[in-house]
């Protein structure tokens, strides 16, 4: 078990202000991958921050071009201590979403880390610079204390996660040997809540659908033509209601997941969602009936209307519009087959009298999940609970999305995500922030987990070495293309 001295060092690194100073230096780089000029800052961030950090861990470092011309480079740091040791793969992303400069409260600059009590405001503070800083710092503390890690390390950084990880899957497939490992430990996304240490094992997938009812180029007077011309807005409203009703219940049987597996239901028993002050309360009577809020969020599929419009809603005129459109998103768990989703939705609508609704898949990303009974899950939970004395929430997946399938399906790895943020961090909005208390506890957790990997014992042995690069995940029923996540 990790020594008290090492725990104290981890806490001191945060308490002394050193963590804040290091994160400040990282946040200064406006690494916005969605902006054409953002990759200039991305390259500088790799060269000036991440390469020196990996060299400081004794890693050899190589930057690779992206096989997808729309994506930025990859950075891989490798430290090999012994072929007999297990190999840890870590992952992080250097890019951030749009900074939304000028929209932050109290005039805050998104590229200047600003403390207000426990909240440290800055773009990337939570997603993902603060999170990969925790893991880099934990590894650095171990090396300074011990002189070695006791395991081999590969650290992969991508630079386009916020725009759907272009090229990541192809890169992983091409570099399987370089990325060969026993387990992935990575940090992204939120904890269950601010107070609960959390492990999650995968991510829901998503498919974005455009429904377009384009009936005529002109609008016609609603008095002279009402009742004899089909209204595209009314048609669209009815079509949507046939897919998901007014109480959020998915109405397309082919898009429902398999029954929630018993291990998943057991893991979610007693899990409370929306547990932070200021979180909205889950609405009674919304979503799939007979399920808890945790089961609906982490174990089930939902179809959400993201946008809906026809004509000018702020300045309506007395006319039947010619066109109406909506964007919907299916969030789905592993085990759901989405390979024919466009056909399924179109056939469903046509059978209910809406053949005039055109259906287009705009983007998609796969779901994946490491099985809850994978021995690495219990190993990690034990290590984390030993150091904190707290129960660790183990979630089968988060409700959102990450490129987990790259590690489970392509590299064949068990995946352990140890998040160092919380649901209210505003990660894609103005006022994104990291909580200092989570950074402090997260550094202790990460240090303890990495220490356990390098110091197995009879009481807490490592899982048996297994052949890597074989599919281990519970996954979606189709190899859906991986594109813009949100």
Image (cartoon, rainbow, N blue to C red):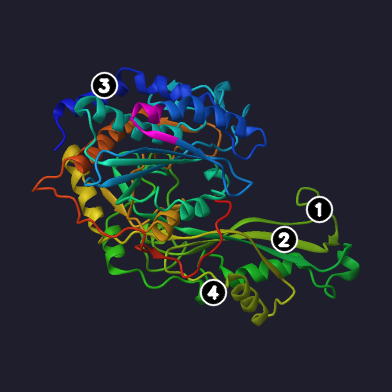
| Relative height, residue 480 to residue 130 (above, below) | below
Instruction: State yes or no: discs 4 and 2 in contact (Cβ < 8 Å).
Output: no
Question: Mark 4 — residue?
Answer: 252
Image-based side of 324 in relation to 75, left or right = right
Which of label 2 and label 1 is nearer to you? 2
Helix, strand or loop at label 1? It is loop
Mark with earlier residue (4, 3) = 3
Residue that extends furthest to the left in the rendered view of this protein: 458
Question: Mark 1 — residue?
Answer: 316
Question: Mark 2 — residue?
Answer: 325
Helix, strand or loop at label 4? It is loop
Mark 2 burial class by Cα count in 10 Å: few <14, some 14-19, many 20+:
many
Question: Mark 3 — residue?
Answer: 12
**Residue 80's quadrant in the figure?**
top left
Mark with earlier residue (2, 1) = 1
Mark with earlier residue (4, 1) = 4
Residue that extends furthest to the bottom in the rendered view of this protein: 351
Label 4 vs label 2: CA separation? 20 Å
């Amino acid at each position: 078990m990790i020594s008290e001295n090492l725990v104290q060092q981890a806490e001191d690194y945060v308490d002394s202000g050193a963590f804040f100073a290091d994160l400040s230096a990282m946040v200064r780089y406006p690494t916005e991958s969605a902006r054409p000029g953002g990759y200039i800052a991305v390259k500088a961030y790799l060269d000036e921050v991440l390469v020196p950090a990996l060299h400081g861990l004794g890693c050899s470092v190589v930057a690779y071009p992206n096989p997808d011309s729309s994506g930025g480079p990859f950075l891989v740091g490798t430290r090999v201590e012994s072929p007999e040791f297990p190999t840890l793969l870590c992952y992080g992303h250097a890019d951030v979403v749009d900074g939304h400069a000028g929209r932050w409260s109290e005039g805050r600059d998104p590229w200047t880390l600003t403390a207000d009590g426990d909240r440290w405001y800055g773009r990337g503070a939570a997603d993902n610079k603060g999170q990969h800083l925790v893991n880099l710092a934990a590894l650095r503390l171990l090396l300074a204390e011990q002189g070695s890690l006791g395991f081999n390390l590969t650290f992969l950084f991508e630079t386009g996660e916020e725009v759907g990880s272009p090229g990541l899957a192809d890169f992983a497939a091409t570099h399987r040997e370089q990325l060969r490992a026993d387990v992935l430990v990575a940090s992204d996304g939120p904890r269950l809540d601010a107070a609960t240490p959390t492990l999650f094992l995968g991510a829901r997938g998503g498919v974005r659908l455009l429904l377009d009812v384009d009936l005529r180029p002109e609008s016609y007077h609603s008095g002279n033509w009402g009742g004899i011309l089909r209204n595209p807005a009314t048609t669209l409203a009815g079509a949507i209601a046939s897919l998901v009703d007014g109480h959020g219940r998915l109405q397309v049987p082919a898009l429902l997941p398999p029954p929630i597996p018993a291990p998943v239901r057991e893991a979610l028993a007693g899990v409370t969602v929306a547990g932070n002050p200021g979180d909205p309360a889950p609405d009674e009577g919304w979503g799939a009936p007979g399920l808890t809020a945790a089961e609906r969020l982490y174990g089930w599929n939902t179809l959400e209307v993201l946008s809906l419009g026809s004509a000018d809603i702020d300045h309506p005129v007395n006319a039947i519009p010619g066109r109406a459109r909506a964007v919907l998103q299916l969030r789905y768990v592993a085990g759901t087959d989405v390979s024919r989703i466009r056909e399924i939705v179109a056939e469903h609508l046509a059978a209910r009298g809406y053949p005039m609704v055109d259906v287009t898949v705009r983007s998609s990303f796969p779901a994946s999940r490491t099985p809850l009974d994978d021995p690495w899950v219990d190993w990690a939970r034990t290590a984390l609970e030993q150091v904190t004395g707290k129960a660790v929430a183990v979630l089968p997946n988060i409700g959102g999305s990450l490129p987990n399938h790259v590690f489970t399906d392509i590299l064949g790895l068990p995946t352990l995500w140890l998040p160092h943020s919380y649901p209210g961090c505003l990660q894609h909005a103005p006022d994104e922030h990291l909580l200092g208390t989570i950074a402090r506890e997260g550094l202790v957790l990460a240090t303890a987990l990495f220490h356990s990997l390098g110091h197995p014992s009879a009481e807490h042995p490592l899982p048996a070495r297994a052949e890597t690069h074989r599919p281990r995940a519970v996954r979606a029923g189709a190899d859906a293309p991986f594109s813009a996540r949100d």
